[in-house]
Amino acid sequence: MVNVGLLISDIPRTTSPQQHFSDLLRYVEAAQRNGFTYLAIGQHFLYGELRWLQPVPLFARLAAEVDPHVRLVPQIIIAPLYHPVMLAEEIATLDIVTEGRLVFGAGGGYRPEEFDYLDVPYKERGARFDESLQLMTKLWTQETVNHEGRFWQLHDVHPHIQPVQQPYPPIWIGAHAEAGVRRAGRYGDAYACPPETPVPEVARRYAIVRDMFAQRGKAFGPQPLRRNVQVADTAQEAMVEYARVAQGRYLTYANKGLDVMNAEQLATEFAQAVSGHAVVGTDAQVIAQLTDLVTRLPVDPILLRPTWPSMSSDEAVAALDRLGREVVPAITAITPRTDIDEALLAAGSAP
């Protein structure tokens, strides 16, 4: 079966922290009730008018709320902002308290100001990320660790926390830039493709990961894919609603440095701007679009974002319930593909 996951949204700071957490518990319950088997949440620091609850303590709490088959995914932790010893021990502990249900989602970050806040040079983030991954896997798998790196040195140290999952939780590396895709191929277990990526480009990136896995002697299989989704009674209603709840957030992303889409087009031609990636339409149309994705691409799980900061908690729960009636059962009935459609690869490599 193709698993379906929920991408949990950030929340406006006008919502109290207590209400924020209460709403999250409602979303988790609704997600489980409707067949979602992965729960994912992102990370930011000093984010202004929007609030992200930090994923490590949040998932430690949510581990007690979710069923044994539901996996928890920080998607993503900004790894270069951490000392790798601290992050390795946090992740190993989280794997223990989630009883081996953790996926470690990591990325390099894209907001220079977050690096400034934490006194980490932004231009060093790629090199720091690479070395962090190298050192963390040593700390998770070796009884005695020696490491002589550019940023960190450890001599004859003895890790005291190992993960439940062996050799360690699956590492999903998320990235917009191709350098991050190659990092996933070198160090990761999967590449978590951003939701704004057009399908032919997804195929091209998966091929990079596949080929780099082969160089490591690692088997390539289905990969996680993120997609934004909106369902309504008609296609027109779905797009109108999607613009209402999501357009402002797209523009916020652009203003905060995520320059993967044209801000002017997002403001003036929203439907056209999102047409290459957003899954919008009636129940049947959304099922058809998602089915096309998971039968042409090697995808598992598919992580859906049906909620946005502009939505009330009742609207968010209603969106999850609607997906659970027809869309989720239709997708989970599909057997994951394990290879890449060559026609998509050809389209992705075209100039």
Image: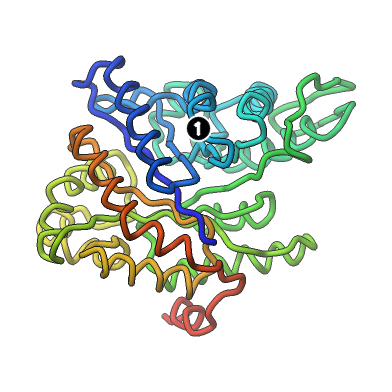
216 up-or-down from 61: above or below: below
* Residue found at x 48% / y 27%: 65
278 up-or-down from 56: above or below: below
Count the marks.
1
* Residue found at x 55% / y 68%: 335
Residue 25 image-quadrant placement = top left
Q: Quadrant of the N terminus?
A: bottom right
* Residue found at x 18% / y 53%: 242
Q: Nearer the viewer, residue 258 or 121?
A: 258
Q: Nearer the viewer, residue 306 or 210?
A: 306
Color encoding of the figure: rainbow
Q: Is residue 145 left or right of residue 54?
A: right
Residue 27 image-quadrant placement = top left
Residue 73: image location, x then y, percent: 52, 39
* Residue found at x 21% / y 62%: 273
Q: Quadrant of the C terminus?
A: bottom left
Residue 340: image location, x then y, percent: 56, 75
Q: Secondary structure at mark 1?
A: loop
Please state which amino acid type lies under the numbered disc 1: Val
Residue 71: image location, x then y, percent: 55, 40
Residue 296: image location, x then y, percent: 48, 75
Dot 1 surroundings within 10 Å: few (below 14), some, or many (20 or more)? many
Q: Which residue is mark 1?
A: 66
Q: Is residue 19 left or right of residue 60?
A: left
Q: Is residue 259 left or right of residue 143?
A: left
Q: Is residue 313 left or right of residue 9?
A: left
